[in-house]
Image: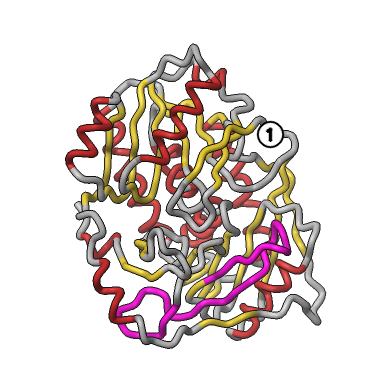
Amino acid sequence: MYDIKELVSLAKREHNSKRPYLYVNPSQGKHIPADPPKMIKMCVCLAGEIEKKYLGEKIFIIGFSETATAIASCVAENLNNTIGFVTTTREDNDKADFIYFTESHSHATEQKLDVQGMEKYLSLAKRIVFVEDEVTTGNTIVKLINELEKKFPALSVKYSIASILNSMSNGRIVELSNMEIDCVWLKKIPYEYNVEALNEYNDCSANHFTTIDKCNDTVKIEKFNQGENIRRACETNKYFEKLNELCVSIAECTCNKKCYKKMVVIGTEEFMYPAIKLASYLQEHNYCENIKTHSTTRSPIMAFDIEGYPLYKRYQLKSVYDSSRTTYIYNLEMYDKVIILTDSDLKSIDGVYSIINALQTEGCKDISVCQWEEK
């Protein structure tokens, strides 16, 4: 179905002794600017594998922050038997009812899931499908299952792990099966596939830049208030109806009925899939000749301007969610039109200035900032 090189580029994490490597998927629309149709096609294929295996079962989907939020959303949209979905988060929310678990190999180990409103979906679902970009042991998901069963002692569902990549050993897959946890994947790869190749970058100079957090230009933020928050359980059809409305509204507001030659839509951290959907909509409706999409991220990854390495440039930014937090964006280029799409409340403007300065450094001039406020 997919060649391994279509889904895997190896990158070097910065200051992470637990797992010094990261698989960067060139089609995912996260770290590398990607073509929207390729990302969506990849997730449609994963949804197809899930549907074949669990035909007719009512499914509730849980996606994982940060990188798999978009995959989980796209799978939920393209899986006929999904009744609802939610993603884990690292963001704070005083109104949430969080359960906590850890992702030990990550740059940010604490994960949490807002279980508010989940009970009504879990009472209807036959199966919970945990969606990831890549799974190596399944340990994080087992931790979450344990916390869910503590929170909902009457829970009576089956469990599955669905991922784009699966690098678990056959023995581990059997262990999970014995725990009544199925695994579905798009591509099976060897454990620690090709990680020895990272050694050739040990003496290379990093191509990193830090942006300033002040801006001479007045930043206009376009606000759209029909938002749904996938960090809390959502009804599938309702969410995507709202997201489609958002795409129409942003196109009408920001593109001035023009067709741009080169365009990018940038999401922010966990807020990935709306950017991908918007980019897809703009392409389908001829607002651009060539469009890419990717997102800012908390993940500190080394960038080397070397042939064959996936990340050739890194900008260090302030987060649009919390100006005291560092985030990153990779492989920026000059675009005729840029749309930044976020669900941050933007109480601190430093994060917006930070990314705008990075884009202006690359020669981008026409930049729109769009905020999808939760209703």
Against 313, residue 151 (above or below) is: above
- Of all residues, the one furthest to the top in this rendering is 154
Direction from residue 371 to residue 180 in the image, left or right: left
Give residue 139's quadrant in the image.
top left
Q: Whole-percent x and y of residue 325?
A: 67, 62
- Taking the image as shown, residue 156 lies to the left or right of residue 272, namely left
Residue at 36% across, 47% down: 43
Magenta residues: mostly which secondary structure?
loop
26 relative position to 216: left or right: left
What residue sits 45% from the left and 75% below the top?
Answer: 302
Q: Residue at x 60, y 66 (%)?
A: 327
Q: Which residue is mark 1?
A: 96
Q: Is residue 265 magenta?
A: no
Amino acid of disc 1: Ala
Q: Is residue 135 visible?
A: yes
**Looking at the image, is 9 positioned above or below residue 142?**
below
| Position in image of residue 155 (x %, y %) | 47, 16
Looking at the picture, tell me which residue is in the foreground, 132 or 102: 102
Q: Does residue 26 appear anywhere in the picture?
A: no
Q: Which residues are magenta?
A: 303-329
Residue 180 lies in what quarter of the image? top left
Please tell me whether mark 1 sits on a helix, a strand or a loop. Answer: loop
